[in-house]
Image (cartoon, rainbow, N blue to C red):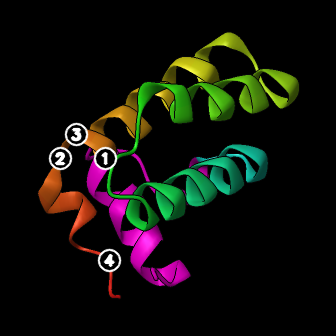
Amino acid sequence: YCNIDSIDNIIKKCLKKNWSIDRLGKPVLAILRLGIWEINKQIHFTGKSIHKYIELTKEFNHHQEVAFVNGLLDKVSNDMSLRNSCIK
């Protein structure tokens, strides 16, 4: 499955040009890493799967971070080039 460097590269590809991965809070980064790992592990990753990461984000973060996590995981789950960029 994906290693952490591959997952971080996927996150970096999804960030706006003026953002770096270092700007992400540790809880958000951990949730994204876990979500992307699961996306790449499963053939049929669903919105229901993303929902659990949204709920987890709500426990630790503000509304803006919830929308960010939702958008990034949705983008990765729907973009096969991002999903396939993990080293397996």
Q: CA distance from mark 1 to mark 2?
A: 5 Å
Q: Main secondary structure of the magenta part?
A: helix
For numbered disc 3, what is the local secondary structure? helix
Q: Classify residue 63 as left or right of residue 39.
A: right
CB contact under 8 Å: marks 1 and 3: yes
Q: Which residue is mark 4?
A: 86
Q: Look at the picture and state if 21 lies above or below 74.
A: below
Q: CA distance from mark 4 to mark 2?
A: 12 Å
Q: Which residues are magenta?
A: 1-23
Q: Position of residue 82 (x, y in %)?
A: 22, 59
Image quadrant where residue 20 sits: bottom left
CB contact under 8 Å: marks 2 and 3: yes
Q: Residue at x 28, y 37 (%)?
A: 75
Looking at the rendered image, the quarter that the C terminus falls into is bottom left
For numbered disc 2, what is the local secondary structure? loop
Q: Which residue is mark 1?
A: 76
Q: Which residue is mark 2?
A: 79
